[in-house]
Amino acid sequence: MIRFPAPLWPGDRIGVTSPSAGVQPGETARIDVAVEHLRAAGYDVVVGEVMDGSGITAGPASRRAAELTSMLTDPAIRCVVPPWCGETAIDLVDLLDWDALAAAEPTWLVGYSDLSTLLVPLTTRLGWATLHGDNLADTPYETPPGLLSWLDIASGAGPHRQRDSGLVADWWTFAEDSRATGGSPSGTGTGTWRPAAPCTRRADSSAAASRR
């Protein structure tokens, strides 16, 4: 059974930590803008100590796992979001305190790309609903028509329906514009969903081929 975290309300606390890549000195302005964006929306934001961007990761795996576990099990924190993704979140999977997490009420964990390696086990091992959505640095961007932001989903009762926006855009680098809220449209496109082909046994496929 999937357990959904409680919807976010204005005044709720959102925790920011870096389970994977940290924040380099030239990137701090964008993180400040994104934190301001959440606070302007009415949320209390707390930024963790594991945010160092001087290396490939924000710190040793044990330290990253400890802060993420602490935020996910803190009843005062209702949602956790990373600054962005990275490449090595998978080294936290065996270091998270799964017993403590299982005893806690579900907390929203939001992110995409490398964060998927943590979203998936939280759902498959604990039954927590997680949000495959924008990381913190992307949160100030305007949401294309037809789509909902992760804040809309985490704060709403649902059900939620999304559709293909058809937008193809290039995004400004944070060094170019740390306060950017929209991309530079470069075209349009649509996605096509194709049903999966039915599985057939090799003998059946061979027999069908021999009849053609």
Image (tube, helix red, strand yellow):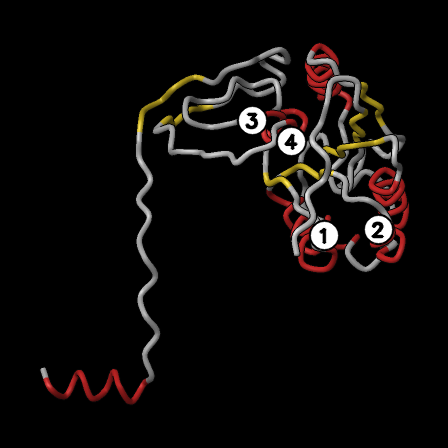
The residue at which mark 3 appears reads as 149
Quadrant location, the C terminus: bottom left
Disc 1 crowd, CA 10 A, few/some/many (<14, 14-19, 20+): many
Task: State if disc 2 and disc 1 touch (CB < 8 Å).
Answer: yes
Query: Which callout, 3 or 1, points at the residue further toward the start of the chain?
Result: 1
**Position in image of residue 169 (x %, y %):** 42, 24
Please tell me in which quadrant of the rendered image residue 188 appears: top left
Which one is earlier in the sequence, the residue at label 1 or at label 4?
Answer: 1
Element at label 2:
helix
Q: Which residue is mark 2?
A: 101
Local SS, label 4: helix
What is the spatial separation of the Cα atoms under label 2 and label 3, in whole angstroms?
A: 26 Å
Residues at marks 1 and 4, CA–CA distance in whole angstroms: 16 Å
Residue, disc 4? 154
The label shown at residue 22 is none
Amino acid under label 2? Answer: Leu
Task: Please name the residue that numbered disc 1 is placed on.
Answer: 122
> What residue is shown at x 77% (from left), y 56% (from top)?
93
Comes first in the chain, label 2 or label 3: 2
The alpha-carbon separation of the residues under discs 1 and 2 comes to: 9 Å
